[in-house]
Amino acid sequence: MMDDDIRPLLDDNGLLRAGEFERLTEMLTASTTPLRFYVFSQNGDARFLPSMLDDHATRFFGGKIGFAIPKKYQGNMPTKDVARLVVLPMDRPAVTLTVLARPKSDADRRRAEDAAFAMNGGNMDAVAARCPTVYEVFAAETDEVAALLLAAVLSSSLLGPIVDAREPAIFAVRTARERLEGAMAGQAYRGTNS
């Protein structure tokens, strides 16, 4: 998915237009982005806060995050939104990723429960159960480092766990950091739940 695919769905403030959520989800479902992270959020809205995201990326992960398409919320607290985020991991090229923010669904709840069960607990599904919003990160397999960095930053700023749809696995920021370090070293992650 490219910026030009998203722009017609946004208003003058860069926010998802009312009534465009269904078309957007159809476009994302049809896309060929096999890597998907679901980041649960304790916030009740779907805002993308540029200063918080970039601050967390810089301070905790040595990276940078910016907006390919700027957003102005001006008091709006949307429950659904989409962003094209430019992610710059340390010592790596920048990658632009699509992130959909939306209310948590029953499928998200089951995804978290299934991942926790597959990992023999960890209680992360209980944290996910308290989160009303999910940020869905779409990426190609070749963009795993950038996608992990973005998921880790979202998790640390939104105070919710991450579900990796490939495994299934559910984890928090510490494990996301370990996975990120392993991906940057070209190694598959082989850790434990945290």
Image (spheres, grey):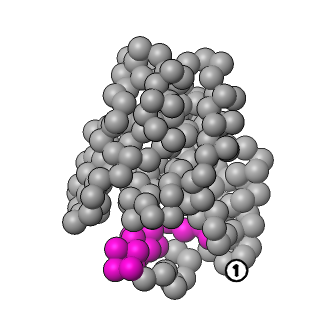
Evaluate whether residue 42 shows in this view: no
Neighbours of disc 1 within 10 Å: few (<14), some (14-19), many (20+): few
Q: Residue at x 47, y 16 (%)?
A: 11
Q: Residue at image x 64%, y 63%? A: 165
* Dominant secondary structure of the residues highlighted in magenta in the image: helix
In the rendered image, residue 65 lying in the magenta stretch gets the answer no
**Horizontal and vertical percent for residue 86?**
34, 45
Measured from the top left, where is residue 140 in percent x and y? 51, 58
Q: Is residue 162 left or right of residue 154?
A: right
Q: Which residue is mark 1?
A: 120
Q: Secondary structure at mark 1?
A: loop
Residue span colored magenta: 169-186
As for residue 175 lying within the magenta part, the answer is yes
Q: Residue at x 23, y 55 (%)?
A: 58
Q: Which residue type does callout 1 highlight?
A: Asn
Q: Residue furthest bottom?
A: 190
